[in-house]
Image (cartoon, helix red, strand yellow):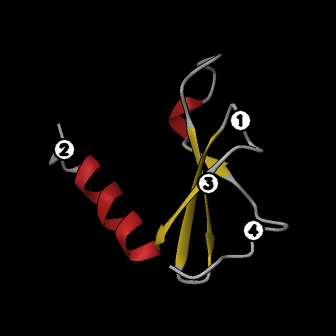
Amino acid sequence: MPTVDLAGARWRKSSRTAGMGNANCVEVTFAGPAAAVRDSKNPTGPVIVVPASAWHRFVAAIKHGALG
């Protein structure tokens, strides 16, 4: 995966985490063909970058219970 410029990225986290206090959450942003994921409690920490298509397949698998 090539280097992705995340300057000015708009990070978002799941709406299901709202009101959960100190929940363990991740945030995601999309930059071109890539999805970047980080720990919401450590926004200056490491970022995992994967192809956006892989991120969408991962989320679909979760929604369909394929990983549980």
- Judged from the image, the secondary structure of the residue bearing numbered disc 4 is loop
* Residue type (three-letter) at the residue carrying disc 1: Asn
Q: Which residue is mark 1?
A: 42
- Judged from the image, the secondary structure of the residue bearing numbered disc 2 is loop
Q: Is residue 45 left or right of residue 17?
A: right
Tag 3 and tag 4, C-beta contact below 8 Å: yes
Task: Write the residue at 77% across / 65% down.
Answer: 9
Nearer the observer: mark 3 or 2; the answer is 3
Tell me if residue 20 comes above or below residue 52 in the rendering: above
Q: Which residue is mark 3?
A: 47
The span from disc 2 to disc 4 (Cα, nearest Å) is 29 Å
Nearer the observer: mark 2 or 4; the answer is 4
Task: Write the residue at 61% across / 29% down.
Answer: 18
| Res 29 quadrant in image | bottom right
Q: Quadrant of the C terminus?
A: top left
Asked whether 52 or 63 is in front, the reply is 52
Q: Which residue is mark 4?
A: 6
Circle number at residue 21: none
Tell me if residue 44 comes above or below residue 20 in the rendering: below
Tag 3 and tag 2, C-beta contact below 8 Å: no
* Residue type (three-letter) at the residue carrying disc 4: Leu
Task: Write the residue at 54% across / 67% down.
Answer: 35
- Give residue 10's position: percent from left, percent from top: 75, 60
- Judged from the image, the secondary structure of the residue bearing numbered disc 3 is strand
The span from disc 1 to disc 3 (Cα, nearest Å) is 10 Å
Task: Write the residue at 35% across / 55% down.
Answer: 59
- Give residue 64's position: percent from left, percent from top: 19, 50
- Give residue 2's position: percent from left, percent from top: 57, 82
Tell me if residue 43 comes above or below residue 23 in the rendering: below
Q: Which residue is mark 2?
A: 67
The span from disc 1 to disc 4 (Cα, nearest Å) is 15 Å
